[in-house]
Amino acid sequence: MSSSLTQNKGEDPGISVAPFRRHELGTQPDYFYPSYRATRLRAPSQPLIFLPHTLSEVTGPVFGHSDILPHDQDLTHQHAGEPLGERIIVRGRVVDGDGHPVSNSLIEIWQANAAGRYAHAKDDHPAPLDPNFTGTGRTLTDNEGFYSFATIKPGAYPWRNHENAWRPAHIHFSLFGPAFVTRLITQMYFPGDPLFAYDPILQSIPDERARQRLVSQFDLETTKPEWALGYRFDIVLRGHESTPFEKPKV
Amino acid sequence: MDLTPTPSQTVGPYLHLGLTDARSVSRIAGDGTKGERMWLTFRVLDGEGGPVPDAMIELWQADSEGSYTHQHSSANGSPFRGFGRLATAEDGSCIFETIRPGCVAGPGETVQAPHINVSILGRGILKRLSTRVYFAGEPANAADPILALVPQNRRAVLLAQPDAARASHWIFDVRLRGEGETVFFDV
């Protein structure tokens, strides 16, 4: 055992692990949220066990330019023709809890097409598929933490969670950040959607201000003249505790 | 700007489109990786014991020497990146090929037993669930500082078991809810 420790390259055993800040109450969804039916059999019933951060939590996979293909960030140019629907630009900045940019970090997105249909074998919503739209994108943030995708505004679609249930239009976002604990998968919504109040997935976040963080803003600066409306969606990943040795907040 | 971290949302039922159809990673350790090669099967089960056919498992692990220095290996073409991800099949299972990780330095003077860090995502899972795979029969488990935080009567659910039918194969069940519920960590 000790031999494996001494072989660690450049990692100081047991010290210099800077823990990440814990979430404030109400700013993240609960696991068990019965009005979102699928949580009833999939949410743990036991309380989570608090895990102080070790090397395993403060490290994480890193992705590079070799993981990105041409057209990965332009979902409107992944096929022979152009997809139907309203072309949009989604742009934003990824920062950590201290406002520092999260640079060169992988972002993956997926979404329904303009008619509200996913190019997925299990989506049986009777809305047309678009042969020119797959709805998947991938990019790295730049040195300042900025990213941008060109895509089509997704449509709302029905789901069978409750009577006459419809999901507000959204784009799924997946981010890694620098560590195992900064992993985030979320959904971006569009401003003013009348379905917000009826959507248990969005409403599962207790804090109203936190919910609003998932709603993108129309942005004239991102809007490209004669081409596409722009939406701004900034993302905050967890930052470090203020000092590396401070006891984490429970 | 409000610096409260962005809230999580479920990956939903179509996660494959964005995350695994073209981008799954079943082989965590490529050819030439040092260490004991092994295969690790996950089975994800719901609160009624039924298979969860639309979950995703992500793994993050140390190398055979207990080091995470491969964190930055995407640039140098190392065969070991320590990262894997797979969607579960109709029977709730998925299988990774990797190497057994070494012991990892823990808090203070402690040493963490070989373990693999796990994220579980899926429809009906509003934020990532996190657990750890340890290995049954590993002597270092007894002194592991994280296992020590888990009530004695629940520790067994964190131990992958060797597959009696296949050499070098291990099985880890993830029970999301109810009897034998997996220990999930607040990371």
Image (spheres, rainbow, N blue to C red):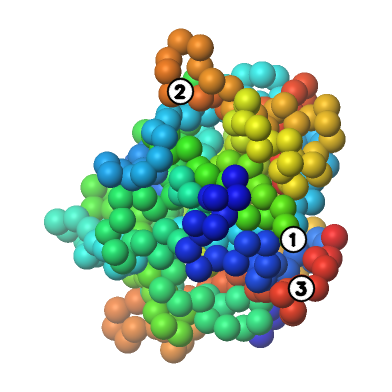
Marks 3,2: beta carbons within 8 A: no
Secondary structure category for the residue under label 2: strand
Per the image, label 3 sits on a secondary structure element best described as loop
Q: Residue at x 76, y 73 (%)?
A: A245
| Coordinates of residue A129 in the picture (x, y in percent) | 32, 44
Residue depicted at 79% across the width and 30% down the height: B154
Say which chain tag 3 marks.
Answer: A
Amino acid type at circle 3 is Phe
Q: Position of residue A172 (x, y in %)?
A: 50, 56
Q: How dense is the environment of label 2, judged by Cα within 10 Å: few (below 14), some, or many (20 and up)?
A: some
Say whether residue A206 is left or right of residue A114. right
Q: Height in image: A107 above or below A44?
A: below
On screen, residue A94 versus residue B158, left or right, reads: left
- Counting residues from the start of the chain, the first of labels 2 and 1 encountered is 1
The dot on residue A245 is 3
Q: Which residue corresponds to mark 1?
A: B108
Q: CA distance from mark 3 to mark 1?
A: 11 Å
Q: Which of these two is toward me, A148 or A2? A: A2
Could you say which is closer to the camera, residue B90 or residue B68?
B68
Residue type, mark 2 in image: His
Residue B49, x across and y down, in percent: 66, 19
Marks 2 & 1, CB-CB < 8 Å contact: no
The local crowd at label 3, few if under 14, some if 14 to 19, many if 20 or more residues have their Cα within 10 Å, is: few
Q: Which residue is mark 2?
A: B169
Q: Is residue A157 visible?
A: no
Q: To which chain does the residue with label 1 belong?
A: B
Q: Looking at this view, name the residue that lies furthest to the left.
A: A80
B42 displayed left or right of B9:
left
